[in-house]
Image (spheres, grey):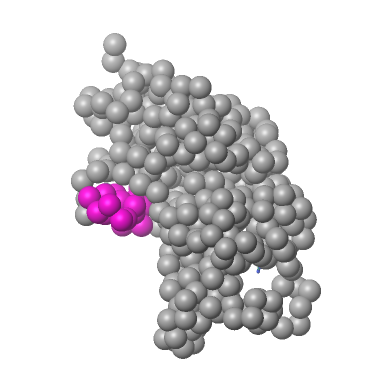
Amino acid sequence: STPRSFSQIIAAVAWEVGKPLSIEEVEVAPPKAHEVRVKIVATGICRTDDHVLKGSFPNIDYPVIPGHEGAGIVESIGEGVTCVKPGEKVIPLCLPQCGECSSCLNPDTNCCLKTHLYESQNLMPDKTSRFTCKGKAIHHFLWISTFSEYTVMPDSAIARIDDDAPLDKVCLFGCGFSTGYGAAINTAKVKPGSTCAIFGLGGVGLSVVIGCKSAGASRIIGIDINKDKFTKARELGATECINPQDFKKPIQEVLVEMTGHGVDYSFEVIGHTDTMVAALASCHMNSGTCVMVGAPPSGSQLSFDPMLLFTGRTWKGSIIGGWKTKDSIPKLVSGYMEKKFNPDVLITHTLPFDKINEGFELLQSGKSIRTVLLF
Ligand code: PAD
Ligand code: ZN
Ligand code: ZN
């Protein structure tokens, strides 16, 4: 049977910048060729969604349905879809893997050229929307818009996962956990016995801590201005935690003194330009590697002393932890099922979907690590 439009679907719409999300009834059109319609079961709230609400995420067209850390079940598929079938458990991919572009064909890269960083994903690939509300077309976010009970995505942006996977937990593999863990494992390639510094101990930064620990780092220094984040960081493997506000000196000087010559690997997981430069200056002048994970505010510029790089430091960026998403996210979920790592500890709150604004307040006030919303 041909799938039809669904009406009275509950979704959270950002009508304009600076306004809280509004729970609305939307209509969701059926998937077109090479598209999949998914019933979202659970979705996490990531700081990147907050950037969308604040207007600091680049190239967003409003009104938009945000959300990109979800898990669900395939409801229907469009013509030509072969990678998933109705009834299968899936994770929508906020970074697609088309399998055909120069990045996808290169075994060493993951940033598919179909990403929003290259071309807007506010509409489906045919430049139309599948969402309507109050007679208006609503934009998609990263092609996946998980803050909707049903959502449509291209087949390059979906991965089938284990039938037994608990969707209310593995949604974190859609962004936060995969991003942080992969930044340590894939991008930095942390070596056993090394010293690491992680700036920002939110859901993503704590996932970096988990990655550094599993790579065998012997010293893991967590840095945050909210000391309430330190308990969990220590539980997950941080050997020391420091608050920059407790020091008169710049934090990079503190870290160089603590380690004698700077850390082997530093990670910026906040998204501020000043901490990006501080993280670079905190690593060893010659052999240090600094990984940028926090999303730069749109339109921002960096200013830094070029000597920081001239002496040999490496500065790298990491999108979704460097994973080729369609290939790797199902494997990460299988690793979770085999108890190789446990991001459940990052979930501090679970709320019904209609309490989504409460979830954002918990993030903004620093009280939550990850809130998972359930439909
Ligand atoms: P979060 O808000 O949960 O965590 C950020 C942490 O940084 C909080 O604990 C803050 O207290 C702390 N912090 C804020 N300012 C400072 C400061 N000046 N010095 C030290 N600590 C500070 O966010 P999150 O963990 O969900 O996301 C972190 C960033 O990563 C954010 O910018 C998000 O957009 C980005 C991100 N990037 C990718 C990617 O693929 N690169 C994926 C997902 C998220
Ligand atoms: Zn995210
Ligand atoms: Zn590609």
Residue at image position (34%, 52%) is: 110
Residue 4 percent location from the top left of the image: 34, 18
Q: Is residue 82 above or below residue 333?
A: above
Is residue 137 rendered to the left or right of residue 260? left
Q: Residue at x 49, y 36 (%)?
A: 335
Q: Quadrant of the C terminus?
A: top right
Instruction: Look at 22% across and 50% down and name the residue there.
Output: 105
Q: Is residue 313 above or below residue 232?
A: below
x%, y% of residue 97?
31, 44
Q: Vertically, is 286 above or below 366? A: below
User: Position of 254 compared to 329: left or right?
Assistant: right
* Residue range corresponding to the magenta coloring: 103-122
In depth, the one of 48 and 101 nearer the eye is: 101
Most foreground residue, 122 or 74: 74
Q: Residue at x 36, y 57 (%)?
A: 117
* Res. 65 in view: no
- Image coords of residue 61 (percent x, y): 41, 51
| Nearest the eye: 150 or 335 | 335
The secondary structure making up most of the magenta span is loop
Whether the magenta-drawn stretch holds residue 107 is answered as yes
Q: Quadrant of ligand 1?
A: bottom right
Total labels drawn:
0
Q: Quadrant of the N terminus?
A: top left
Residue 335 can be seen in this image: yes
* Image x and y of residue 84, in percent: 33, 25
Question: Is residue 369 within the magenta segment?
Answer: no
Can you say whether 200 is above or below 14 in the image?
Answer: below
Residue that extends furthest to the front in the rendered view of this protein:
193
Left or right: residue 340 compared with residue 228: left
